[in-house]
Amino acid sequence: MELLTPNIGLLFWQIVAFGGLFFILRSFAWKPILASLKEREENIQSALDLAEKTRREMAAMKADNEKLLAQARSEREAILRGAKETADKLIAESRDKAESEGKRILEQARETMQNERQALIMQMKKEVVTLSLDIAEKVLRKELSDKSSQEKLVNDLVANSSLN
């Protein structure tokens, strides 16, 4: 049982050795260890703060990038919409211009045709008149070769003119 109950002397020297070791460690080891632990804790805390700051900055940059991307998309849509409107306007203007040009050309062709028709009718009338006069002249020469037929023609013409 001697092993289970320590001797007072042994206990005293163990306490003295422990106290001495405690004093030496406290004086020379714990201060540098605690200082290095405190420094390490500060480094870790600053690293955590920097990581948190970086995370916030990254979130802000991501939000800014998304905002810029949305703005760029809206500008692209506006540009595309404007280009489409311009293209539609140009197409409509071209179509209107082509239609008006076509109508003008068609009207000009109709007018030309009408003028040619009038000229043709006038020429035909001239030719008919000329032919009629030639025929009438020949007929009159033949019929008016004697004096009695001339008198009869004059009387008929006078009778017809008073009726009209």
Image (cartoon, grey):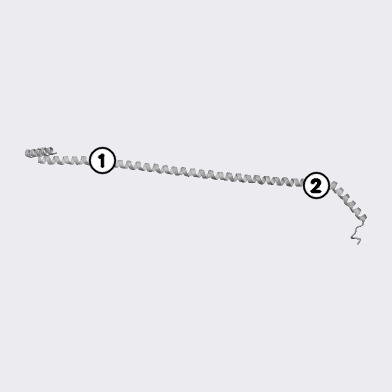
Q: Position of residue 113 (x, y in %)?
A: 29, 42
What SS does tag 2 mark?
helix
- Can you name the residue that lies furthest to the left here? 148
Which residue type carries mark 1?
Gln
| Mark positioned earlier in the residue sequence (2 or 1) | 2
Drawn side of residue 26 relative to residue 163, left or right: right
Say which residue label 2 marks. Answer: 34
* Residue in the picture at 86% in, 49% down: 22
Q: How many marks?
A: 2
* Residue in the picture at 31% in, 42% down: 110
* Residue in the picture at 21% in, 41% down: 125
What is the CA distance from the residue labelled 2 to the residue labelled 1?
122 Å
Q: Is residue 11 above or below residue 79?
A: below
Q: Quadrant of the C terminus?
A: top left
Q: Position of residue 83 (x, y in %)?
A: 48, 43
Q: Position of residue 122 (x, y in %)?
A: 23, 40
* Residue in the picture at 70% in, 45% down: 49
Say which residue label 1 marks. Answer: 118
